[in-house]
Image: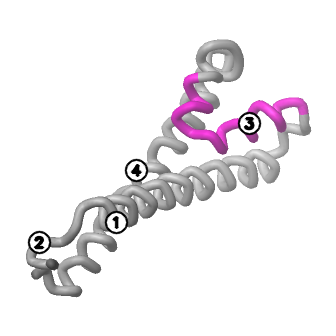
Amino acid sequence: MVPAKTRHEALVIVMSVTVVAGMAIAVLLLLLWREHSAVIAQGAGMNVAVAVCPPFMLVYIARDMDDTTLSQLIIGGAVVIGNGSLYAGLAMFVMWMTSRVWPRRGAQ
């Protein structure tokens, strides 16, 4: 039987890695949008960006708003935090499903 401490440590590690991965993907997409906006802001580039980072849709929605630094900071922060939370929630769901589908060793 696996001790509870080990299970919780695995949960914390998986959640930490997925939050950081989600945030890194969002930051990468935002940097690509700032440098190559014509490629990623419309067409297939936008579809791929939204498939990988659904909160990136805020960039498409708010592109016609004013381009102040504060508005870009708020939109960028919302995309980064939203994608990190989305990835963590997905990882938590996968861990919960695997704990329900596959029984623990020694539990009979």
The amino acid marked with disc number 3 is: Val
Q: Is 25 colored magenta in this rendering? A: no
User: What segment is highlighted magenta in the picture?
Assistant: 48-64
Q: Which residue is identified by label 2?
A: 105
Taking the spot 67% from the left edge, 48% from the top edge, the residue there is 76
Spatial separation of the CA atoms under disc 1 and disc 4? 25 Å
Q: Which residue is identified by label 1?
A: 100
Relative to 81, residue 39 above or below: above
Q: Position of residue 2 (x, y in %)?
A: 13, 80
The amino acid marked with disc number 4 is: Ala
Taking the spot 82% from the left edge, 32% from the top edge, the residue there is 63
Mark 3 or 1, closer to the camera: 1
Q: Which residue is identified by label 4?
A: 21
Majority secondary structure of magenta residues = helix
4 or 3: tag closer to the N-terminus: 4
The amino acid marked with disc number 2 is: Arg
